[in-house]
Image (cartoon, coloured by chain):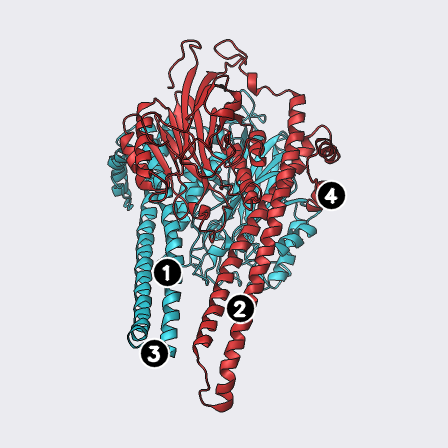
Chain colours: A cyan, B red
Amino acid sequence: MSTPDPVHPTSVRLRVFSLNCWGIRYLSKHCAQRYTMIGDLLAKEQYDVVLLQEVWSEKDFDALRKKLASSLPYGHYFKSGVIGSGLAIFSKHRIQDTFRYRYSLNGYPYMLNHGDWFGGKAVGMAVLNIGNTTAHFYVTHLHAEYSREKDSYLPHRVVQAWELQHFIRYTSAEADLVVLAGDFNMHPMDLGNRLLRTYADLRDAYVETPKFDGCEDGGTMIAENPNNDMVPPEKGIRIDYILFKGSSRLELHCESMSTTKGSVLDHAFPYSDHEALTAELRLDRVAQDGVSQDGSNGMGPLARGSDRTAGKLAELVDIVTEARTEVKVGLHCAQGMCYTAARTGVMGLVLLLLELAIAAVPWLALGAPGPFPSVSFYLLGALCFLILLTTALLYLFYTMEIKSLQEAEDQMRQAVGCLQERSPWRNTAALNVMDALAGGKQVETWDFYSENQQAEM
Amino acid sequence: MSTPDPVHPTSVRLRVFSLNCWGIRYLSKHCAQRYTMIGDLLAKEQYDVVLLQEVWSEKDFDALRKKLASSLPYGHYFKSGVIGSGLAIFSKHRIQDTFRYRYSLNGYPYMLNHGDWFGGKAVGMAVLNIGNTTAHFYVTHLHAEYSREKDSYLPHRVVQAWELQHFIRYTSAEADLVVLAGDFNMHPMDLGNRLLRTYADLRDAYVETPKFDGCEDGGTMIAENPNNDMVPPEKGIRIDYILFKGSSRLELHCESMSTTKGSVLDHAFPYSDHEALTAELRLDRVAQDGVSQDGSNGMGPLARGSDRTAGKLAELVDIVTEARTEVKVGLHCAQGMCYTAARTGVMGLVLLLLELAIAAVPWLALGAPGPFPSVSFYLLGALCFLILLTTALLYLFYTMEIKSLQEAEDQMRQAVGCLQERSPWRNTAALNVMDALAGGKQVETWDFYSENQQAEM
């Protein structure tokens, strides 16, 4: 509500809402009615900032904007890709500026049944001034996970999380407060999530809040939701998040958090196939002497002892190394696919040339039309041409995928090198292996010491 | 050389080099020999940071890296797109981290003769620690200008400049010093350049330096260069730049600047079709009391009086409005092309259906094969199919182009609104029109006041 708080008179409170709207016109069940319900909710509740995902049609955004003209007068729809990014923000406070980073990787254009590629997935940033506070709000939607056991999109999602943490880390330096919300399509302890929390120093509202009202284990994809046809485990999974961090100038606490619980009172169906998240954040300005205005130690949750820093560095090296392993796996697959496309293309070309030779030889030899051209000849020619065209497009696509994966891998190698340089214990590689063995984790160290030295030769 | 300076004993100097290498293997003249020359130069001269563009082959980067192992031990090649971004950085100081932002727009894939689209143009960022100074180096290469009179890529280049200033503004908040170098493909007073200098607060080394040794008017594409077949005006054009800014913690001066002058001593041809740039920067740390350690006023060039701020705001509003006009022109063209693609696609589909009907009718009516299928029938069918496929791909492409242009336009509208809000004179729109009339400039104000109000309704 961004109003002073009676218990902490100098504090300001902020209500943040996040929802994956599942807004595919004509395909998502009860789409229009659900948007009406969402609009009613947003108009009624006193939110400060609303971060929406999967608003696939700009018309729906415009309708919401009209409806929320008085309660949330500022808004921005992040346009990207063929359909759009699906990301939108509404705010009670004036949006000063927006910026968008489109992820390098986001599935495959030929996976029409999944369709993520067409969405132009991105992270949208909005800069707000709330009183004297510069707040950066980020909204994102990462690539869906269609199969947990055989998740062929994992390297893409890991690269997205990598780019996301990079983007937030560098663009939030001036911010007093950072909030990232969205559908990450990752379970709480998944690699990308750990990367985000550890590298970008973000705190999970669900974990931090002393007061939670919502589904068991904070689930946001639950079996009780009749719109949800992904059949998650019985007690649901948590894949939507509100993460946050303060700064040396501002201390941030999550006072309470809630989610919807599948059904909505007086309505036949829920708002979406995901549950909506609401977090109440308390902002305490840190006084110059390091003590916040309400008397508590302002640096509280942000204090970083050297032990903690050392521990965090080691954890980060582990996580980035694990991410690098995933990217390498993706790179290996992409290189294989690229090779297959090239080989198939060459086969198509040889077949086409062979056909032309067959057609040309009797014409050259006899000077008169032979049994050619026949139906099969033209059909085969068309097939060869189609193979050539398709493989050429695929080759282009896989080459770009490889470049993006290589770039992420290079950045990760560099990061690991620099993190190790900063670490109080230099022989972290050996420590990592010991940690991994002790914890039963499958962490490959990729012998990065020698690789780094070679690369930085 | 990042060594203390005898005249300013507490200052540090930094030598920065930038060159568009024109490194298209097998196509650029004397490519391999020129890389040898470039490598020799970089190994001999004591540069701190080298920023290269158009290094299209990673093999050439690797060869340079090997050659520069002792003089510039750190390097990064920014991978992007089909071919790569062509951007590379070499440094004497350890590269702590790299990040890359790929531009939303970069020409058209079917313009094979221009080929910019395949380059995956981007801005590469490298974070360096030089002593206690955090330095952010940016290298970029914007879309080429093939015709100054009829520059169909202007909206793309303006959006690139817009994204570039956005990226630099937000990612450089923590930096003590910022250097951006590259081939901008823009003349000094071109819109994109003004946008960069004004919005991202960057200073042009060529303009700032008291000591310049190089081509007339700082030209970097000159008629004397035998590799240059773009035939620029007789005295050459300046399209390559080194821009920089300090921070409240660090004052930055360009002490001297030089460019190559077409020919190279003892060599038959120059390093590239562009001239190379070298800038010597002096870094003075600003003391806490606002006076730098060498006694001068540390805030010197960074000081911003309120008059200056007001003047700058008005200038910015003008520039962003002009950029918005260009983007709107581009949007209009893209929408036209998208419509044409859709219409042609529908025509192709109708023709294909007509063909099928012609083929089907005699088969249905007579139950026996008529004169069909003939050569022309199959050829026409293949043509229709090709039209359908091509127009579908073009439609996808133009849809994405429109989304990116719309996003930039939205951001610009927002920026103008916020800049006007901050301006001491509110009725800037009217002032702009007066300015435009007085200066004879064609600035359209697009009646943004009413539009903003409508959009932020």
Q: Looking at the picture, does residue A47 appear above or below residue A23? A: above
The N terminus of chain A sits in image quarter? top right
Please tell me whether mark 2 sits on a helix, a strand or a loop. helix
Within 10 Å of disc 2 (Cα), the crowding (few <14, some 14-19, many 20+) is many
Mark pair 3, 1: CA separation: 35 Å
The C terminus of chain A sits in image quarter? top left
Mark pair 1, 2: CA separation: 23 Å
Mark pair 1, 4: CA separation: 50 Å
Q: Looking at the picture, does residue A452 appear above or below residue A347? A: above
Q: Tell me the number on the disc at residue A368.
A: 3
Q: Which amino acid does label 4 sit on?
A: Ser
Q: Name the residue under label 2.
A: B348
The reply to whether label 3 and label 1 mark residues of one chain is yes
Q: Which chain carries label 2?
A: B
Mark pair 3, 4: CA separation: 74 Å
**Nearer the observer, disc 3 or disc 1?**
3
User: x and y percent of residue A141 in the render?
Assistant: 50, 50
The reply to whether label 1 and label 4 mark residues of one chain is no
Q: Which amino acid does label 3 sit on?
A: Ala
The reply to whether label 1 and label 2 mark residues of one chain is no
Within 10 Å of disc 4 (Cα), the crowding (few <14, some 14-19, many 20+) is few
Q: Which chain carries label 4?
A: B
**Nearer the observer, disc 3 or disc 4?**
3
The reply to whether label 2 and label 3 mark residues of one chain is no
User: x and y percent of residue A337 in the render?
Assistant: 33, 57
**Nearer the observer, disc 2 or disc 4?**
2
Within 10 Å of disc 1 (Cα), the crowding (few <14, some 14-19, many 20+) is many
Q: Tell me the number on the disc at residue B450.
A: 4
Q: Name the residue under label 1.
A: A391
Please tell me whether mark 3 sits on a helix, a strand or a loop. loop
Mark pair 2, 3: CA separation: 34 Å
Which mark sits nearer the N-terminus, 2 or 4? Answer: 2
